[in-house]
Amino acid sequence: MSRPQPASQHTVRRHNSALVLDAIADAPGSSRAAVAARTGLTKATVSSLVDRMIGAGLVAEGEAQARSGPGRRGTALHLSPTGPHGLGVEIGVDYLATCLVDLTGRVRARWVRPSDNRASSPARVLAKVASAVRTAAKQDVPIGGVGVAVPGLVEVAGGSLRLAPNLGWREVDVRGELTRRLELDVPVLVGNEANLAALAELWHGDVAADFLHISGEIGIGAGIVVGGALFEGVSGFGGEIGHLSVDPRGPACACGSRGCLERLAGQDEIVRAAGVTGVDELLARLAAGDRTATTAVRSAARWLGVALSGAVNLLDLPTVVLGGTYARLEPWLHEPLHAELDRRVVSAEWSPVRVVASSLGAEAAVRGAATTAVRAILADPDPYVTSVLA
Amino acid sequence: MSRPQPASQHTVRRHNSALVLDAIADAPGSSRAAVAARTGLTKATVSSLVDRMIGAGLVAEGEAQARSGPGRRGTALHLSPTGPHGLGVEIGVDYLATCLVDLTGRVRARWVRPSDNRASSPARVLAKVASAVRTAAKQDVPIGGVGVAVPGLVEVAGGSLRLAPNLGWREVDVRGELTRRLELDVPVLVGNEANLAALAELWHGDVAADFLHISGEIGIGAGIVVGGALFEGVSGFGGEIGHLSVDPRGPACACGSRGCLERLAGQDEIVRAAGVTGVDELLARLAAGDRTATTAVRSAARWLGVALSGAVNLLDLPTVVLGGTYARLEPWLHEPLHAELDRRVVSAEWSPVRVVASSLGAEAAVRGAATTAVRAILADPDPYVTSVLA
């Protein structure tokens, strides 16, 4: 009697596939028997699931291991370095970046190109993005998913970009548009660049499980990580530290408010006040001890200190990670920023705030976007396996 | 052979006692059989635990229920209204309050008295608190625990008060001091008043699971509730919205910073700017349309709007609850506060912020303190039961 498999069996396989792959990711080199011992599944179940995942290219077998007991010798299992890759794209205000990572999160290729996205329509920019994705997808590896980092408000339910003040974009269905433009049959995930940068910091950086990652670019955003998980608010709109009013009667901001941090300590304002053409020139001037450049950066640092003090007073987080341009400026930001934190954080004496420069630099957001795409496969491999084996 | 009961059996009883009491609290009137069905425990286990909890006064039996099947008729079980009560105390800047609640959280008695705690030493204030607790404990009900709300930084580990700028207190071991002064052999829990007020709002108020509760008194504090749980930061120092710098170059604050919200929109500043002697007079003047009073409250509302916009931009919470004095001032705060939120919250168009006045009024913090004490017993009843039956 042939009947469709009951749904519950699919559900069990889906759940067990995730368990098995997680065990392999967590202890590379494990044998099937070790995976069975760790997951509590039978060796037959593990073998069947592992065989499917080898067939789909998620898992690779290494050398046969020394015999440690009766039965067939175990072979070492690993996430396959030639398995599905995550392709990250970042739509910056003045650049496009892509990044290709393998299943272990290792960066295989990256690419950044200046692109004045402020001056272009969303359709033109998304056409460029689609072209960049197609170019990157021509590498000799399968693409398992695309992650897109955007500098604006992304609703968690739906992945639509509501507003990107620095791009001048409103209501752009980035996920829908890119899915249509790409000829790849893979999921497209869209997220806020500051949140994705914070996740990259959590996964690949040197900090613990509770921190605020602040991305300083033309826009300023924060990703808040609490207990090892991203805190993005009820709709996904949290972390908008760039629009904290640090000088409520100050200059008008593109968002409609006044005296936002971004307006007083963003990259455009620092570059303008320093009288330079860009960040590279700024760094050269700072290194040479130029007074105008130093004053500009110190002023930004003080506003940054006001905003971060507010965030720490509300959230009581022990660590702030400076990302993006702020990571490069850290030596000059350090002293005035700490002076504000010491003065304004009411609990500073008992819960001092550590400020560190991100080791991931400008690539944090695009790397987070790429890693998110592979993590989605690792967390739930069965749909991918089924689509490859079909 | 008589041997000490193995630890694991204690652990099992402790766990099961909490399960059974939770089932009774959640469905008052349940029979032992219904509790067994709900918890998955055997009827014999449930009966034995219920009998212990009746003996300790936690659970009371009501009428025998109509027979719905074979066997003994079930009797309805309830949390006992004469069981252990929680005694809450709030050390305000200019008052002391106490509140007695039963196991269901119902308020049985409350009491507020002006007390200029700023002008007294911690030792004198704590002597007054101990005396108030002893008076309240003379009611004809058992006290199961004492909760203390303080207007300052309380470290979650240890319950020590680190700093209360408006009291001028530093490093006061409130828990240790009160435990020594009281002749009650019950736990003393110490918490930040804004956090306890937010918990009272969560347990007894009209709002959902995600909100920021802002307590406006002489000091201003916030309690942040996310997904039905208090978010208090890594050390318990979160929610210090009163020390958000809304005017970084503004007037000096007792905390050492400048232009803190508390300094510009706290009760003392409103009363001073309105030229009145206290909040009752302020409300009378506002009701009469007095221009100076109206201007003072509108100015506070704008600063409050700046600070709350910052909090919402960071946290993306859908609801703000105005507590303490702000609840009474809400009709006059409403318009200018919303104007700031509309202008400064970058996601306001997609995730509008609802602002409501707390229905709990000035008693929220002390009620939260009292309820915390009974909730500690409900969450883990066995130690209380064992101490009573011993």
Image (cartoon, coloured by chain):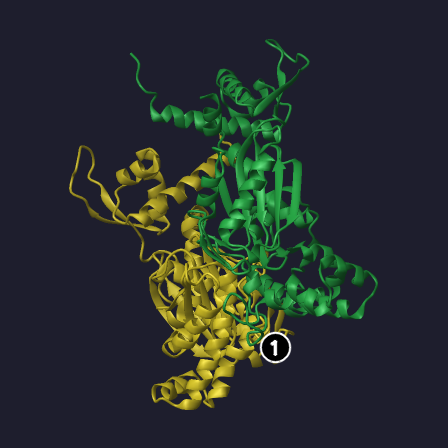
Chain colours: A green, B yellow
| Camera-nearest residue between A260 and B61 | A260
Instruction: Provide residue A102's location: percent of width, then percent of height.
Output: 61, 33
Closer to the camera, B350 or B140?
B350
Chain bearing tag 1 is B
Position of residue A237 in the picture relative to residue A268 (left or right): left
Q: Is residue B144 visible?
A: no
The spot of residue B271 in percent (x, y) is 47, 85
Image position, residue A206 (x, y; %): 68, 46
From the viewer's perspective, is A237 left or right of A211?
left
**Residue flagged by tag 1: what amino acid is it?**
Cys
Camera-side residue: B101 or A1?
Answer: A1
Query: In the figure, is residue B227 to the left or right of B174?
Result: left
Vertically, is B186 above or below B337?
Answer: above
The relative height of residue B78 versus residue A243 in the rendered view (above or below) is above
List the single residue furthest toward the top.
Answer: A71
Residue at image coords 59%, 32%: A138
Q: Which residue is mark 1?
A: B253
Q: Quick one: A157 or A269, which is closer to the camera?
A: A269
Q: Residue at x 62, y 33 (%)?
A: A104
